[in-house]
Image: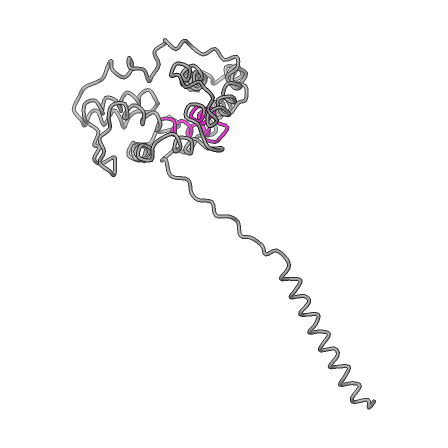
Amino acid sequence: MHKGALRQASATGGLVAAAAFALLSVSLALRQPLPTAPAAVPPNPTTHELPPSAARWAPLTRVLLADDLTAAVNQLRLNPQFDALSPREMRALVDQSCRVPQLLQMDGRDGPDWRRDPYLHRLQQRCAGWAVPSMFVAESGDDVYWEEGASDGPPALLLQRLREARDPAALRRAWWDAYRFDALPQEQIFPDRRRLLPEEARHLIEVVIDWRQCARYAACGPDSLLTLRVCASHGCLGEQDLLGAWNQALSPRDFEAAQAISAWLPRWVVDE
């Protein structure tokens, strides 16, 4: 064969080989799994929660997340700053959670329930050894508290007291006073212009207080004692944070109403 022909054949063969290699590379590349973009995380519905003051409230956060409540509270009592850490509020939060089994029994709701039982079991494990006070002791949510000692006054004064409330008990009482004496501008608070019944007013402010306390103590997640209390009381589908637990426990209209109240109320000053 002529040398020129040989050179042309060799060049042609080189081009064919290069093309074949390129095709093979493309084929192999196409077989590789494509990189996936990180899944978009939908934003949580706002509850107008306060950012937690981690440094101040960290000891109480540990109590609300502890597997052994009794041991955690005993450890907290050794803290030199114990008296400044709202010990009565801490005790109320723990008692409120640990008496859920008694409340279910009193309400005739202590039978098997697959939505409640896993959370009730976890709650009972945490509360083991905790001395729950008698159910006959008046608590903040009882009728005795709600009905007696209401403070009358002009609407402006009642709303001022409500805006100055800086703890759950003060907020609860100021809210009830403003509701009882028709000082709440409900047509401004609720987009659907609903008028709360007394039992609704009592219940929804407790939901808002729950949200604010979980934010204050950075204890809003699935392992929080506050979340376990709601799921053990009402049942939950899957692991929920406190917002999700209340979203499942309330009707859509009541959940929106609780969010509206939270948006309308002034925010607490966490570090006061």
Of all residues shown, which one is farthest toward the front? 112
Q: Could you say which is closer to the camera, residue 254 or residue 68? A: 254
Q: Is residue 230 magenta?
A: yes
Q: Is residue 181 left or right of residue 226?
A: left
Give the image location of residue 260, x and y in percent. Answer: 30, 35
- Stretch in magenta: 209-231
- Main SS class of the magenta portion in the image: helix
Q: Is residue 68 left or right of residue 219?
A: right
Q: Is residue 201 magenta?
A: no
Residue visible at 30% across and 24% down in the picture: 165
On the image, which quarter does residue 161 sit in?
Answer: top left
On the image, which quarter does residue 269 sit in?
Answer: top left
Is residue 135 something that shows in the picture? yes
Q: Is 144 located above or below residue 49 in the figure?
A: above
Give the image location of residue 154, x and y in percent. Answer: 16, 24
Q: Quadrant of the C terminus?
A: top left
